[in-house]
Each structure stands twice: as structure tokens, then as C-alpha cells.
């Protein structure tokens, strides 16, 4: 199991859910993982799981909406490992509120985490990857960027924006051998589904571990090859024909 042997990978939102599963899957494939999220306790728990399996993990508490902290994340990664090969922009915030009841603060919070955070991390990654003429950035989007749910405006807007950012970054990185892609998950068993068991039973959920396997596949693609965009979802989920 060495598809990512000795690759240096930063994963944001790595303390729980999808990010945690991606970090563990990367480590299982030989990557040296750098784990970022706001919660130091959760990061350390994931890092200990990885280390217990004999792999390398560095936990760096980071708020991706704060420029100084993002710069520090990449600086510490360079100091520890000398380069960044892979960035997974997974940190995300979700809210379900009718638009006419949505506060400006909540709107801004979702956009800041889901979109501005991805921009800041990608910018720092490009600054490291361009001189090396190699690297890969994988953005975790959502099928909400294709077919939104009701009462979900800031999340949908952020994921539509993330797709636009992905395409722009792919152009910016193309001449430097940097691949940028976006993966749109459907219903995934994370904490956002707490209290929604009836809906989960009707639509189906997939495991974050299964999603992480696809992220490994994208990350392990040969230099010069990119899977620009993909959708992965339970076959029972009412996405096709939805609405």
C-alpha cells in the first residue's frame, strides 16, 4: 500500500468526518500527512491514530479563514518536510436556514470557510509548487454545486464558487505541471446528518472511508494527468432528476 509513498500532503478539516478519513487513507498509502483544523484536540487524536499505525502525521491547528494562520501552516510544513506535494481543501461549514431568515454573519462565515479558506490555502500551495513544477490540489466540493437543496443558499453558493476557483487554479497551474481538481460528494455520513435519520434512510449515505478511497485515487494519478471533476454518491440518492 504505497500509492502515495513519501508524498507530503496537507489536509484541511482533518479533525473529523471526511477530512479525517482522507488523512488516514493517505497515511495508509505512505504519505506524510499534515493535519489542519481549528480543534487541536481532535487533530491530535487523528494524528495519534496515524502514528499508531506506523505512519507520519503532523497536527497544526489552523483557522483557514485567517491569512496569518494559513501562511503559518505552510511555513511549518516546509520546515518539517521541505515541500508540499498535495493539498486537500476539505474544511467546510454547513448551514440550513431559509434565505429570508439568514443573518449576514452566517452567510459570511460559510463563504469565508468554504471559499476564502480554499483560496488562501491554494495560494500558499501554488507558491511552493510552482518553482518545483509539480503538485496537486484537490478541492472537496458538493453536489450542491450541481443541484442545491432548499434553504441552503450560502453553502450552495460557496460550492459553486469552489468549482469556479478549481477551474481558475487549474489554468494557473497548468503550465507548471500542477493538477487541480474538484470532487463533489453526495450524502456522506458525517455529523451534519445528526437528527436527520429519516432523510438519511430514504436517500442513503456513503461512508467517508469510501469517499477517501477516491481521493487517494485522484492524488495518486501520474504526473501530467488530472481528473478535473467527479461526482460520487450513493446510487439510491435522488440526485438525477431531483427537483
Image (cartoon, grey):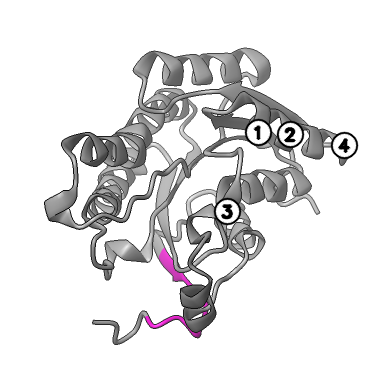
* Residue identifier under label 4: 52
Report if residue 231 lies within the magenta region: yes
Task: Compare marks 1 and 4 and give the one earlier in the sequence.
Answer: 1
Q: Would you say the residues marked 2 and 4 are in contact, meaning their CB atoms lie under 8 Å apart?
A: no
Q: Is 148 placed left or right of 215 in the picture?
A: left
Mark 1 closeness class: few <14, some 14–19, many ≥20 residues within 10 Å: some
Mark 2 closeness class: few <14, some 14–19, many ≥20 residues within 10 Å: some
**Residue at the spot x=48%, y=51% of the render?**
224
Q: Give the image location of residue 158, x and y in percent.
A: 27, 48
Label 3, label 1: how many angstroms apart (C-alpha)?
32 Å
Mark linked to residue 222: 3
Of the two numbered discs 3 and 4 in the rendering, the one whose residue sits closer to the viewer: 4
* Residue identifier under label 2: 45
Q: Give the image location of residue 121, x and y in percent.
A: 41, 30
**Residue at the spot x=61%, y=32% of the render?**
35
Task: Compare marks 3 and 1 and give the one earlier in the sequence.
Answer: 1
Judged from this view, the residue extending furthest toward the left is 100
Which segment did they paint magenta?
A: 230-238
Q: Quadrant of the N terminus?
A: bottom right
* Residue identifier under label 1: 42
Amino acid at each position: 500500500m504505497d500509492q502515495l509513498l513519501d508524498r507530503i500532503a496537507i489536509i484541511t478539516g482533518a479533525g473529523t468526518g471526511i477530512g479525517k478519513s482522507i488523512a488516514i487513507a493517505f497515511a495508509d498509502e505512505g504519505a506524510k500527512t499534515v493535519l489542519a483544523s481549528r480543534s487541536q484536540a481532535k487533530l491530535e487524536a487523528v494524528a495519534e491514530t496515524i502514528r499508531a499505525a506506523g505512519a507520519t502525521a503532523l497536527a497544526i491547528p489552523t483557522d483557514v479563514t485567517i491569512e496569518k494562520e494559513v501562511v503559518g501552516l505552510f511555513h511549518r510544513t516546509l520546515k518539517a518536510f521541505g515541500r508540499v506535494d498535495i493539498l486537500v481543501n476539505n474544511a467546510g461549514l454547513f448551514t440550513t436556514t431559509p434565505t429570508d431568515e439568514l443573518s449576514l454573519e452566517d452567510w459570511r462565515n460559510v463563504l469565508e470557510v468554504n471559499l476564502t479558506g480554499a483560496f488562501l490555502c491554494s495560494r500558499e500551495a501554488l507558491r511552493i509548487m510552482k518553482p518545483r513544477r509539480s503538485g496537486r490540489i484537490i478541492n472537496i466540493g458538493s453536489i450542491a454545486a450541481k443541484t442545491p437543496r432548499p434553504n441552503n443558499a450560502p453553502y450552495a453558493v460557496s460550492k459553486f464558487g469552489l468549482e469556479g476557483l478549481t477551474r481558475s487554479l487549474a489554468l494557473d497551474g497548468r503550465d507548471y505541471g500542477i493538477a487541480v481538481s474538484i470532487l463533489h460528494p453526495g450524502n456522506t455520513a458525517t455529523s451534519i446528518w445528526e437528527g436527520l435519520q429519516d432523510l438519511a434512510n430514504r436517500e442513503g449515505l456513503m461512508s467517508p472511508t469510501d469517499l477517501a478511497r477516491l481521493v487517494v485515487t485522484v492524488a495518486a494519478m501520474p504526473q501530467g494527468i488530472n481528473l478535473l471533476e467527479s461526482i460520487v454518491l450513493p446510487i439510491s440518492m435522488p440526485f438525477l432528476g431531483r427537483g
